[in-house]
Image (tube, rainbow, N blue to C red):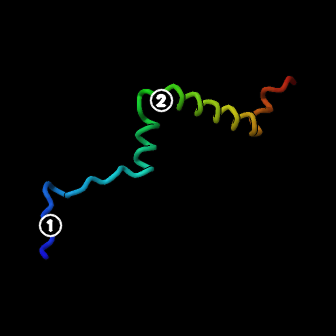
Amino acid sequence: MAPKQLNGRGGRTAEPSFARSAVQGLTSAENRSIVTSIGLFAIGVTFLHSSWAEILLPA
């Protein structure tokens, strides 16, 4: 029996990978404020956990 002919270029469409869909989700305009606030929160926690947080203490 002969193989079936595929119509179109590839015959099937590949699902986008998890990494590609995650990057597209993070860079979309709808999520910009959420991603920005999470990033600023992470920077604040990192600053307060570092030795640079000592400059906030009164002398």
| Left or right placement of residue 55 versus residue 43 in this view | right
| Left or right placement of residue 10 versus residue 34 in this view | left
Seen in the picture, residue 41 relative to 14 is either above or below; the reply is: above
Percent position of residue 23, x then y: 44, 43
Q: Compare residues 22 and 6 and report the one nearer the observer.
A: 6
> Disc 1 versus disc 2: distance between alpha carbons?
44 Å
Instruction: Say which residue appears at 12% left-offset and 74% top-offset.
Output: 2
Q: Compare residues 5 and 56 and report the one nearer the observer.
A: 5
Q: From this viewpoint, which residue is outermost toward the bottom?
A: 1
| Amino acid type, mark 2 | Asn
Q: Give the SS element for disc 1.
A: loop
Instruction: Say which residue appears at 60% left-offset and 30% top-offset.
Output: 40
Q: Residues within 10 Å of mark 2 (few under 14, many from 20)?
A: few
Instruction: Say which residue appears at 15% left-offset and 71% top-offset.
Output: 3
Seen in the picture, residue 9 relative to 1 is either above or below; the reply is: above
Percent position of residue 45, x then y: 70, 35
| Left or right placement of residue 28 versus residue 38 in this view | left
Which label number is shown at residue 4?
1
| Amino acid type, mark 1 | Lys
Quick one: quadrant of the C terminus? Answer: top right
Seen in the picture, residue 49 relative to 33 is either above or below; the reply is: below
- The residue carrying mark 2 is 31
Kindly check if marks 1 and 2 are in contact, taking CB atoms under 8 A apart as contact.
no
Total count of labels: 2
Q: Give the SS element for disc 2.
A: helix
| Left or right placement of residue 38 versus residue 33 in this view | right
Instruction: Say which residue appears at 64% left-offset and 31% top-offset.
Output: 41
Give the mark, 1 or 2, whose residue is nearer the N terminus. Answer: 1
Q: Residues within 10 Å of mark 1 (few under 14, many from 20)?
A: few
Percent position of residue 57, x then y: 83, 26
Quick one: quadrant of the N terminus? Answer: bottom left
> Closer to the observer: label 1 or label 2?
1
